[in-house]
Image (spheres, rainbow, N blue to C red):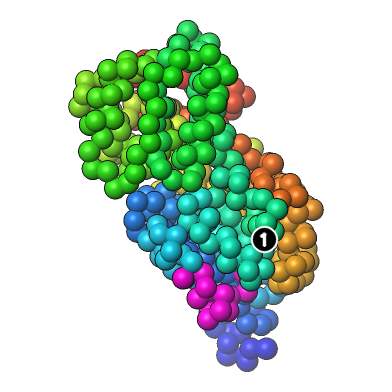
Amino acid sequence: MVNGSRLAALAGAAFFFVAGGIALAPAPAFAAGPIVIGATISQTGPLAADAVFQLKGIKLGVAVANAHGGWLGRKIVLKTYDDQSSPGTAVRLYQRLITEDKVNLLLGPYSSLVTIGVAPLINKYKMATLEPGASVPTIYVKGNKWNFQGIASSTTYLQQLLPLAKKRGEKTVALVGLESAFTLACLDARVAQAKKLGFKIVYRTTYALPMPDFSPIALAIKNAHPDVVLGCTYYPDAVGIARALHQQGFAPKYLGETVGPVEPAFIKALGPLANRIVSNTSWWHNFKTPGNKAFIAGFEKKFGGAPDYHAAVGYSSVEVLGAAVKATRSLNQAKLRAWFLSHSVPTVQGHFKIDANGLMLGASQEMVQIQNGVLKLVTPPSLAEGKVLAPYSGS
């Protein structure tokens, strides 16, 4: 229990979120010590441009939960470390979170690459861990009983692009991908899809970061002259490939890149080169999901800019974790695990629902395109803000 002065200190004004935005309300008086959530995030390194949005979404989720009384009458505290986009660093830091910081709950890191490194540790200590940034389906296998996917599978990224291009008469494709867990899984799925649809694959390669010069790849793509260029990318290589193609003077009819184009920094970095690049998102501002308007308003108020789908996934992971804690009235990891596996939770990005191995069933990736400097949703038809424009001009 806390003393009277402590309760008084906690009783000042706080923000809470309502359907139309933000209002002032008295802060709740918390009845016991805090519930501590631990996580690492790639605040630096090649994954940082996207990962920081996931962290912002998590921070907002915690702030909203605390404004509504926390969980089990206790304040929620978020404890994070920078894993520097390194699996080895993340493993060391999750070990610290579990054994030294003794956090009550965990959320997974950003990216499948880092998550694959951490997964054995999560299972060793039997911590029921939502994974907001790990899309590779092979993470969620029988041997990993304590990892639960919070985002759409990597096999669904840009899945709409090749069928659309084929319908419009395109026949050839070049496919490139970063040598990382998520991007390789994405690449394999799109290669299989291209073959099934009857596309001629005129060029295919992988590359590693850091790679400051994409000129050789861009030149090879130019010489192959594909109708479609599809890249399974993160932010740095998505920017690099678009620039290199422009420098080589080649523009395919369609240029699609996965992670990267949804960030405001991408459009700022490329300027007109970004126009008509196609990408994907598992969340959008016009989704008719519970709390979506309040999420957007809260994010803009707290961070001074619009959220992306990484932010929505981070926020949703807190929504799901809170639902489990409240329903079980417990921080017991086995009880939380059982609840995750047997329940569906409505979130701002859609329904959290997983199979017996923890694989996400309730989320998918839709397609977006940058049009005149603005990112627009182009699938599904019921929510689309416009149609996919072609050709990609590359200027």
Eyeballing the image, is 390 above or below 382? above
Q: Is residue 44 found left or right of 388 in the rendered image?
A: left
Q: Residue at x 56, y 16 (%)?
A: 197
Res. 35 image quadrant: bottom right
- Tell me which amino acid carries mark 1: Trp
Q: Position of residue 384 (x, y in %)?
A: 55, 25
| Image quadrant containing the C terminus | top left
State the residue in front, 117 or 105. Answer: 117
Q: Residue at x 35, y 51 (%)?
A: 46
Q: Is residue 308 found left or right of 274 in the rendered image?
A: right
Q: Position of residue 223 (x, y in %)?
A: 27, 17
Q: Position of residue 359 (x, y in %)?
A: 67, 47
Q: Is residue 93 magenta?
A: yes
Residue 347 visible from this viewpoint: yes
| Image quadrant containing the N terminus | bottom right
State the residue in front, 292 or 320. Answer: 320
Eyeballing the image, is 130 above or below 216? below
What residue is disc 1 on? 146
Eyeballing the image, is 77 above or below 142? below
Mark 1 closeness class: few <14, some 14–19, many ≥20 residues within 10 Å: many
Q: Is residue 256 magenta?
A: no
Residue lying at the far top of the rendered structure? 169
- Give the total number of marks visible in the rendering: 1
State the residue in front, 9 or 370. Answer: 370
Residue 24 visible from this viewpoint: no
Q: Position of residue 338 (x, y in %)?
A: 78, 60
Which element carries disc 1, helix, strand or loop? loop
Q: Residue at x 39, y 15 (%)?
A: 227
Q: Residue at x 60, y 65 (%)?
A: 122
Residue range (magenta): 92-105
Q: Is residue 288 found left or right of 111 in the rendered image?
A: right
